[in-house]
Amino acid sequence: MTDGTLLFSVFKGNPELPTAVNITWSSINFKTILQWQPKPSGYFYTVEIHGQVSDTKKKCILTTETECDVTDALRNVKETYTAHILSVTSSRVDNFEEPPFAASEKFTPYNQTVLGKPEIRNYTQKASKLNVVFQDPLTPYTFPNGSFQSVRDIFQHDLEYKLYYWKDQSSGKKDVTTKSHKFEVSVDSTKNYCFYIQGIIPSRRENRNGQESTVLCTSVGRNILDEYGAEVFIIIAVIVIAVITLAIVLSVVLCKRKKAKAAREKEPLNGV
């Protein structure tokens, strides 16, 4: 009876447990994490994912964490979902009374997940052509054979990639777009180029641009001037001129001292 009385008094004294606030969706390449506040004390959270047509799915049951990976509950990526974060005590799991909860904003993975960084696999600069080959980011979702689907497998023709490129040590950028896995652009064969790639979903109103890949630079024909800049050579030239000038001055001073010494050595002979 002691336990039963304690539980009853808790429910009577706390008919409404605290509910979650600041609920946010964080999604990159369809890996989706739900986050909220505050950290629970004396109660737990359970997450329910409600779709427009799919069945309700429960995730992170009786958790004391304030985040939950809901990726596998959002497999129909074009469906719009709402998350309910229930505040519960362990004793109320089988209770038919609906626990207090907070609802998230609506989330549609296809429209809102952020495109991750594409991976540059290979690049070459030969003569006046810059060639770049890259790979699509992978998603957590798999094909029946177990291999991971890429963002291209999901977005298909909605997905484009843009290559931004510029002459090394220059700020003027150019760009080209492709729906394939490679770029070929015409460049100045005497200059080195830097570049990066970014995925784009043109049909979106928001989150159109994905994350930028690592910036890489070619090194064909790179010389010392390209590497260090003209300023370094000006400094070196000034130092060399200063050293030469100092050497000339020292030579003149030493020469004058020798002549003066020779003259002093001859003076006694002239007096005899």
Image (cartoon, grey):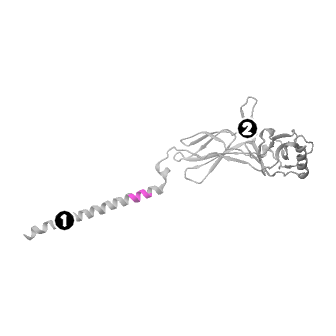
Which residue appears at 20% of the width and 67% of the height?
260
The quadrant of the picture occupied by the N terminus is: top right
Where residue 71 sits, quadrant-wise, is: top right
Disc 1 marks which amino acid? Answer: Lys
- Left/right of residue 46 with respect to residue 167 in the rendered view: right
Q: Position of residue 228 (x, y in %)?
A: 48, 52
Mark number, residue 93: none
Q: Is residue 226 above or below residue 93?
A: below
The residue positioned farthest toward the right in the image shown:
96
Q: What residue is pinned by disc 1? A: 261
Q: Position of residue 125 (x, y in %)?
A: 55, 41
- Left/right of residue 130 with respect to residue 65 in the rendered view: left
Q: What residue is pinned by disc 2? A: 140
The tag earlier along the polypeptide, 1 or 2, is 2
Q: Is residue 264 above or below residue 20?
A: below
Segment tinted magenta in the rendering: 234-239
